[in-house]
Structures are given as C-alpha cells and as structure tokens.
C-alpha cells in the first residue's frame, strides 16, 4: 500500500507540471528523496526483555531551508510511507512560504502497547540513532500521529544531552515550559478553521445551517470539530478509530470531548453511561460517516480513506483534508467529476507546521509571543496562501489540489534553479 502511496503522491506532481513551466533539473530533483535513514532501536522493556524497533527519518528536499516534519508512532509505518509524507511536507512548507524543506520520521509500533517508561526509552533511543541526521539548521522534527509534546520534550532533552548544549530549536511541538510555542497544540485545527473561514463565502448557507462530519477525534479532529461547533456550525457526526456517532440536529462537541477524555474512547458514548442518555444519536461506522449527506466533510484520521472504491458514494459538497493524504488520486478524479470541492491537505493542515516555524523562530530569538500574536500571524499566512491557491485554481480552471501543487512548485522550482541549472552550461 505504501509504495502506491508514494507513486500516488508523485502523480500529483505530474498533474501540476502541466500548468507551470519549471526547469527539467528542478523536476528531476523533486522526484527523489535527498536522504533516507533506517535505524534499529534497541529498547529494554519493563519486563526485562529486549525489543528492537524499526525507525525511519527521511529528508526529502532542503533547497528552501532545513527540512521540517513530524515523527509518527504507528504500526503501519514503513520507509515508503515516511518518504511520501516527507514529499508532502516539502510542498506544504513551500505552499506556506516557510523557509523549510520537507522531512518526516516514524517508528513502527503500536504505542498503546507500551508503558510510558518504555515509550520514553524508545523516544530517547530514536534520537540517539538519528542525532547526526537532524539539528536546528539541518532537520527539525515535530509531533505527528501518536506523538505528543511530552515525547518532543524527551527527544529535545536527549538531543541536548548528546550535543552537551541546551538546543530547544532542534524539535518543535514541545511542552510550553521548555520552549514550546503557545498555540502549537491546536495549530493544525486553528489553521484549518482559518482556511474554512476564508472560503466560506462559497458555502450554500450560514454556519448554523451548514452540516459538518469529522472523521477522526484525535488532536486535530477533536479541535476542529469544537472550533466549528463554537462558530455555530452544525457538527452532525464525529468518529474515532472504533466508530462514530451521528445526529441530524448536531452534536454537543465539548461534552463529547470531555466524555471521550474521561473514558478513553468514543465507544463509551455509544450506549453506556450518562451521556448516552442525554445525546440522542445513531451509531455510524467510519466508512458510513464518509458517505453522509453533509455540506462539509473533514477527514482528520489516516491516509487513503477515500479511494476509487467509495468516491462515488461521497455526498459532501466540500471536503477539507485535515489528515495527510486521506484521498488518493483516483478518487480525486471522481470527486472532481461530481463537482465536489476538495481543499487539499498541504494547505488545510499546514497550520501545524506553520506554528512549528513560529516556535523555531521564538527558540532562536529567545523572545516568546503571546497566543494572540501566534494566532494573528497564523491567520495572516493561512488566509493569504488560501487566496493565492484559489486564484490559481480559477485562472487555470483546475482543482484546488492541483493549484496548491502549482503554487508550491513555483516556489520550489525558483529556489532549485537559483542554485544553478543546466542552462548555465548548455547555453553558456
Ligand atoms: N506532523 C505535522 C504535519 O504533518 C507537523 C509537522 C511540523 O510541525 O513540523 O504537518
């Protein structure tokens, strides 16, 4: 699956190339990751046994600056998947005009099976293994699926021990008390909210009449559901990895968040306990949630949720990709033919890496910003780049995804060429 994920990711590049003229050198350059590292991490488990975990870090392209991207802990992590995600990060950073290239990391494991102490040993072991591959001016990791500020704190501490120098700018998404930025934990959702807001003049109705379904109730999914709920949108369905709930009158998202946190999963809401009695709902599977007749669908979980298999059943009018890669390129085509607007991941979820950039800037300058300052700068960036992408899509009559790639490619192409192209030699 992940091999096709990478070729699928590169297909987006091919499509965008039809609408932009960039040098052959730049195209060749972008087809391959700059460097991929695979490491084996030995970890002493709580019962005294030794387990070896496979870890990866890929630096895809650093033409525009040090590479940037999260680290995920997930059983399906492979080198191919990490390469695809690093490719997306390259475009995401270019789309937001951040002075970064793209990278990604991951460890193949089920984080729910490890104790906290085992997770700490694993996180520190991973940093020991990749320390020479990363750094504040080389490659700066951050959180992703199942990695948290606490894990970033352990990793930054381990890196500082290795370097014998406190180095907060080596990782972003850290706890605020050790150099994390205010607003980083909610940045992906907040950024997505600004994107939705800046194109909501297209919505057929006012927020209170606009229905929303959110797949995934992790950090990004739960926060975007809550932000939209607070702005008056009717969030009719949410789900986590075990399944979801739906009610046509709209859900009370803050109480679902509280309940999920207290009971460690949405399943508790299905039909046990008090909330079950106060929330009138139907149970839906993750797949059923995707095909609900809503105005806005927000996939905020994993890759490849909408493919050629279910694209025809999608009824939403707008899809905002809060997850990375939830729609494959075969499905893109079908959704386009159905007239569904797909607002792509490399724009919608870029709030996370944008506030990571702000965190890196704050660490390096030693001057820390207020939450209002962070959100103000985030809004400015998200609104500005959404506008550019919207205009490119209109100008060429292309999808917003292709427009986002054209926008990113333009910046990447110029940067690659400014380091020298074959024209210097062939025509010289
Ligand atoms: N993992 C996040 C992403 O996919 C954030 C990356 C970062 O902050 O560097 O965009």
Image (cartoon, helix red, strand yellow):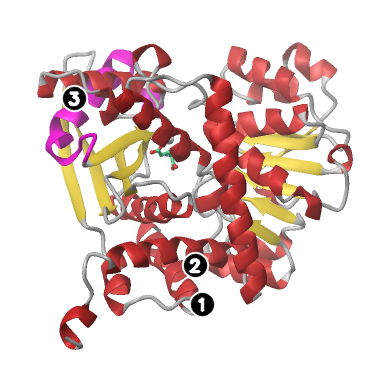
Residue 44 seen by the camera: no
Q: Earlier in the sequence, mark 1 or mark 2?
A: 1
Per the rendered image, the range of residues in magenta is 110-137
Q: Position of residue 356 (x, y in %)?
A: 41, 33
Q: Nearer the viewer, residue 1 or 250?
A: 250
Q: Which residue lies furthest to the front in this view?
A: 428
Name the residue at 37% across, 44% down.
Answer: 76
> Which secondary structure, mark 1?
loop
Is 366 located above or below residue 390 in the figure?
Answer: above
Q: Quadrant of ligand 1?
A: top left
Closer to the observer: label 3 or label 1? 1
Name the residue at 54% across, 51% down.
Answer: 347
- Category of crowding for the residue at label 2, using alpha-carbon neighbours closer than 10 angstroms: few (below 14), some (14–19), many (at least 20): many
Q: Is disc 3 in contact with disc 2, using a CB cutoff of under 8 Å? A: no
- Category of crowding for the residue at label 1, using alpha-carbon neighbours closer than 10 angstroms: few (below 14), some (14–19), many (at least 20): some
Q: Earlier in the sequence, mark 3 or mark 1?
A: 1
Is 129 located above or below residue 100 in the figure?
Answer: above
Q: Quadrant of the rendered structure where residue 75 is? A: top left
Residue at label 3?
Answer: 159
Q: Nearer the viewer, residue 6 or 93?
A: 93
Q: Nearer the viewer, residue 109 or 137?
A: 137
Residue 231 seen by the camera: yes
| Alpha carbons under labels 1 and 2: distance apart | 7 Å
Q: Nearer the viewer, residue 83 or 53?
A: 83
| Alpha carbons under labels 3 and 2: distance apart | 37 Å
């Amino acid at each position: 699956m992940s091999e096709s994920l990478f070729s699928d990711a590169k297909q987006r590049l091919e499509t965008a190339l039809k609408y932009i003229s960039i040098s052959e050198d730049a195209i060749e350059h972008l087809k391959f990751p700059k460097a991929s590292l695979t490491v084996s991490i030995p970890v002493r488990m709580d019962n005294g046994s030794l387990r070896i975990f496979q870890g990866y870090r890929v630096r895809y392209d650093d033409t525009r600056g040090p590479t940037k991207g999260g680290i995920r802990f997930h059983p399906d992590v492979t080198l191919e998947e990490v390469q695809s995600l690093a490719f997306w990060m390259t475009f995401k950073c270019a789309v937001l005009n951040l002075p970064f290239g793209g990278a990604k990391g991951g460890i193949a494991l089920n984080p729910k099976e490890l104790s906290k102490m085992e997770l700490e040993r694993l996180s520190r072991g991973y940093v020991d293994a990749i320390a020479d591959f990363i750094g504040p001016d080389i490659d700066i990791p951050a959180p992703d699926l199942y990695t948290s500020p606490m894990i970033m704190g352990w990793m930054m501490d381990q890196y500082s021990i290795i370097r014998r120098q406190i180095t907060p700018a080596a990782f972003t998404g850290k706890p605020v008390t050790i150099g994390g930025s205010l607003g980083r934990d909610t940045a992906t959702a907040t950024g997505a909210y600004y994107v939705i807001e800046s194109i909501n003049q297209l919505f057929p109705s006012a927020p209170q009449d606009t229905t929303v379904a959110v797949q995934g109730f992790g950090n990004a999914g739960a926060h975007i559901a809550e932000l939209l709920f607070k702005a008056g949108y009717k969030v009719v369905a949410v789900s986590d990895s075990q399944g979801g709930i739906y009610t046509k009158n709209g859900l009370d998202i803050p109480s679902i968040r509280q309940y999920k946190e207290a009971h460690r999963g949405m399943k508790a809401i299905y039909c046990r306990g008090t909330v079950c009695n106060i929330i009138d709902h139907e149970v839906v599977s993750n797949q059923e949630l995707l095909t609900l007749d809503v105005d806005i669908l927000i996939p905020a979980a994993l890759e490849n949720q909408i493919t050629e298999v279910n694209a025809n059943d999608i009824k939403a009018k707008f899809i905002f990709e809060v997850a990375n890669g939830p729609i494959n390129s075969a499905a893109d085509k079908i959704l386009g033919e159905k007239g569904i607007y797909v607002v792509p991941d490399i724009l919608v979820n870029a709030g996370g890496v944008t506030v990571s950039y702000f965190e890196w800037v704050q660490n390096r300058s030693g001057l820390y910003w207020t939450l209002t300052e962070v959100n103000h700068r985030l809004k400015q960036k998200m609104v500005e780049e959404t506008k550019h992408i919207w205009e490119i899509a209109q100008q060429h009559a292309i999808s917003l995804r292709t427009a986002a790639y054209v926008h990113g490619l333009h910046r990447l192409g110029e940067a690659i060429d400014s380091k020298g192209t074959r024209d210097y030699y062939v025509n010289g």
